[in-house]
Image (cartoon, rainbow, N blue to C red):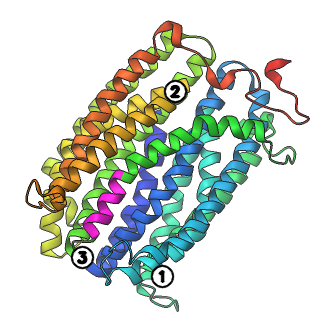
Amino acid sequence: MLAAPLVAGHLSTGLIGFVDSVIAGRHGTDTLAAVAVGTALFWLPMMVPLGTLLSVPPAVSQLDGHGRREEVGPLFRQAMWLAAGLGLLLFCFLTAVVHALEPMGIAPSIVPGATAFLHGIRWGVPALTLYVCMRYLSDGLHFTVPGMVLGFGGLLVLVPLGYVLTWGALGFPELGPGGPGYASAVMLWCQAIAFALYLWRGRRFAGLRLFGRFEPPRWAPIRRLLAVGLPIGVTVAMEGGLFVVTALLIGRLGEVPAAAHQIAINVASLCFMVPMGLAEATTVRVGHALGRGDGDGVRRAARAGLLIVLGTQAASALVLLLGNQWVVGFYTADAAVAATAAGLMLYAAAFQFPDGVQVISAGALRGLGDTRVPMLLAAVSYWGVGMVLGSMLGLGLGGFVEPMGPRGMWMGLIAGLSVAAVLLGLRYRRSTRPRRLDPLLLRPGSVELPGGVSPASG
């Protein structure tokens, strides 16, 4: 019950890329290739702040489980300062990164369109970080429906606006690849404003006084959120970066491989929204159980998440194996792009199970506040194994094999995720030994109320 709205909310987020890709693909192969590269460069840096803010749900759920709800409001206000700062940093990064497209080796025909897409979507970055912070607060308190409703509500803005701006209609100029970027930015601000109004006026949150007073940034709670969240952000970025850098390397092979990869990775990303939502629910339930000192509850929550994710990943693998041709038809009418994308989706089917196991393990570890060692394990898995092997097979680096193109890069993805599943699973088993269960986020001084008073210390 907790995970279903989270899964739906993540699916709505994944559908942003789906809508952008479908609109761009119908506009032309060059537009789709440009949006593919632009999307990769947008989500790679965004994974750091979005992952860092994942420290909010376990912090809130542990406070809730410990009966310290009066501390949720002050923590939330500091988390919003953190979200605003991260959003501003990412806006500046996206403004500057367009100048690095040509040095990266991106095909010259793709660079102008990718630049237009990034120039548009960067305006929505601060809205996205603030929206995610508000959603994580609600999720940590077991109110997961608002994220689902606002997620799909945003699509009602994105679909018509993306079409109008991409193709040029109703008096608007034809922006091509820039259309989905600007449309996504408008949608993100609509979602952020709507969520803020919901938290402000919602009866469920009235007692928390989330916007009850203005507070300047306070370093102590922000530092605590960063201490737990930054390793999460780096871990998420390393996993997502494995996919994003793969897209950038494939972008060097030309428009058809880049467009085909964008289709396949977008479908795989939609499938990933299911275990991601289950992992967030697992984080909340594990954190809540840890906050109330229930070690058996911690292990039950993690086992439940694992059992469910094995079933959902089996369903995803079947869809990718049996329906790849049908799904590709939604994206493009180009025969060469469709054939390549359908083949890549078979590789996506192969990593559904290891991807599900590793993301659930990571979610359970986040609920425990165990984030630093998993970050190192992720580095070894995603980059030491996945990227190295993918580059060797796909691009022929090192001269050991003939270049296999996109297929070789996807083999590297499978290997990296499989190693991550094993290592993170072993880490979870070690971290849930009874003597190791410790609510890190509830130690004295973890939350600072106005005036410098720490509730944990009286």
Measuring 69% from the left and 18% from the top, which residue is drawn there?
A: 66
Pick whichever, 107 or 118, lies toward us. 107
The reply, left or right, for residue 355 in relation to residue 394 is: right
Of badges 2 and 1, the one in the foreground is 2
Q: What amino acid is at disc 1? A: Leu
Density class for disc 1 (Cα within 10 Å; few <14, some 14-19, many ≥20) is many
Measuring 23% from the left and 39% from the top, which residue is drawn there?
A: 315
Q: In the displayed orientation, state which residue is furthest to the top.
A: 435
Measuring 45% from the left and 78% from the top, which residue is drawn there?
A: 115
Q: Earlier in the sequence, mark 3 or mark 1?
A: 1
Mark 2 — residue? 370
Mark 3 — residue? 255
Mark 1 — residue? 165
How much space separates mark 2 and mark 3, taking CA atoms? 42 Å
Residue 184 locus on image (x, y percent):
51, 68
Mark 2 secondary-structure assignment: loop
How much space separates mark 3 and mark 1, taking CA atoms? 23 Å
Pick whichever, 285 or 152, lies toward us. 285
Q: What is the magenta range?
A: 242-251
Quadrant hosting residue 142:
top right
Mark 3 secondary-structure assignment: helix
Q: Taking the image as drawn, is residue 406 in sight? A: no
